[in-house]
Amino acid sequence: MSLALYRKYRPQIFAELVGQNHIKTTLQNELATGKVAHAYLFSGPRGLGKTTVARLLAKAVNCLKRQAGESEPCNQCDACKEIVDNRSLDVIEIDAASNTGVDNVRENIIGNSRFTPTSRKYKVFIIDEVHMLSLSAFNALLKTLEEPPPYAIFILATTEIHRVPPTIISRCQRFDFRKVGLADVVERLNKIVNAEKRQVDQEVLISIARKGEGTMRDAESLLGQILSLGEEKITLEQAQLVIPASSFSLIFDLLNHLIKKDLTGAITLINRLVQEGVDLPQFTDDLIEILRKILLIKIGGSLNEFTTLLDQEFESQVSKISKELSLAVLTKMIETFVRAKSELKSADIIQLPLELSVIEICGQDNQDNAGGGTGGAPVLTKSDKPIKNPLPPKSASPLKAEIKAPDIKTADKIKLTIEQVKEKWDEVLTGLKKYNQVLASTLHLHRPTAVKENGTIEISFKYRFYQQRINDAKNLRILEETLEQVFKLPLRIETVIVKELPQPEVKASVVNSSLAGQASVDSLLQTFGGQLIE
């Protein structure tokens, strides 16, 4: 049976460690000066090399050929070979997840620590997933950690440092492992590919590194799957059998649509992604990462090292887009898509949160876009009245400037019925369109269902992500100020979730106005081969 790549190419000296220089330097100095601690605590996410460093340390302290002032194990002496082959009697590895009880600690750790090493200088205990120990087991281990025998070294490893008692942490030298940078991961993967005498396209290695999310073991495991395809040279097309195709080219297409305020093109692209089976949550994650990269480039080019790694063609596109978007627009885009990402989880129509997001972005005022763009302002329908005056400065509320003093100022004097609210709801929607078309579209099918005596209007929603969109502080303020403009009353909004929404009432005036567009309806029916049901 062949070894997995992460085991086959496990670092055997400190120099081979990737991305943990802060830990490597400290441990090498301690080994060179002979000031090795009696207890260490390694914490950090999985797959970053905690167990590997523990074995390196155990090998270094017991190496028979290591001289004073040196830190690297020789890997040639009997002590080193025993540890490499996992047959050393003086290096005891314990899985705390399988040995959580106090009896296991007493037998495997405390009992064993009373005996001197069989043939080496130190007896090393490596306790993996130490946070899984019970409280009584930690208490039993505490005394041994506090006053260990001179020949015993304890190395504790955990992925959940918050579950380790402070009394244990305080008796150990703590080292926090960090995720590995993309460039370091790609360099390491290149070395493995060369050692395997195979050829893999650089784009594939970048995709693997990105998919590994800073975890070296995950990246090496994925590389192993790629190499198992059996081809002498692995191309990006072949690698897509194992890893999903990169969506960055599609992301740049979407960003170009947004820059041009091409709403139709953006919506079409999103629906094409759904038809082609693209993972929309992953696509949104990549989109946010690219926008973050553009944002950091905009702030300062040196920050680019903290972002995702792209090939030269994509990097040039990122550079071009960064010149066309202002910081304000980039920030707004990121905020909008982060919100859409959370809404994707509960969306009944998977692409709807992204569609609403691009509508919101394309409806932004052009003056926020440093690169210009075309067709920025939303098109007014015949029933909409054009805005005579531009929006007031940002320091002023966008609606307060148009609101006259309300007839009634105190909430306890408000006398308003649900029928009166429904009567003027279309007027409210028309007012909202001037400032936020997405908000108006959302409320078109979510009508008020009750009015309380204190002037609070209740609006019902079936899906939580619609409710969250309305409850956004900015949207809520615009809606309440529009209500005050229409009703001349200081009204407030309250949202609730219901199983079924009431059917919206259609006014005769609305029906009559829709007759004017009958030709358009007939055209749609002819195009899609449908029929009108009375």
Image: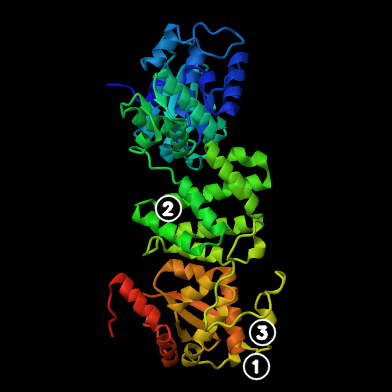
Q: Which residue is mark 1?
A: 407
Dot 1 amino acid type:
Asp
The local crowd at label 1, few if under 14, some if 14 to 19, many if 20 or more residues have their Cα within 10 Å, is: few
In what element is the residue under mark 2?
helix
Which percent across, then down, holds residue 76? Answer: 45, 7
Image marks 3 and 1: residues in contact by CB distance under 8 Å: no
Which of the labelled discs sits on residue 494, or is there none? none
Q: Residue at x 56, y 59 (%)?
A: 260
Q: Give the spatial CA distance, label 2 vs label 3.
A: 41 Å
Dot 3 amino acid type:
Ile
Residue 166 visible in the shown view: no
Q: Which residue is mark 2?
A: 281
In what element is the residue under mark 1?
loop
Q: Give the spatial CA distance, label 2 vs label 1.
A: 48 Å
369 sits to left or right of 112: right
Q: Earlier in the sequence, mark 2 or mark 3?
A: 2
Which of the labelled discs sits on residue 403, or is there none? 3
Q: Give the spatial CA distance, label 3 vs label 1.
A: 11 Å
Q: Above or below — where is 400 with respect to 63?
A: below
Depth check, front residue: 64 or 506: 506
Question: Viewer-nearest of labels 3 and 1?
Answer: 3
Image marks 2 and 3: residues in contact by CB distance under 8 Å: no
Q: Residue at x 47, y 77 (%)?
A: 443
Q: Above or below — where is 302 with respect to 459?
A: above
Q: Residue at x 38, y 42 (%)?
A: 244
Which quadrant of the rendered structure holds the N terminus?
A: top left
Depth check, front residue: 322 or 479: 322
Q: Residue at x 55, y 68 (%)?
A: 472
Dot 2 amino acid type:
Pro
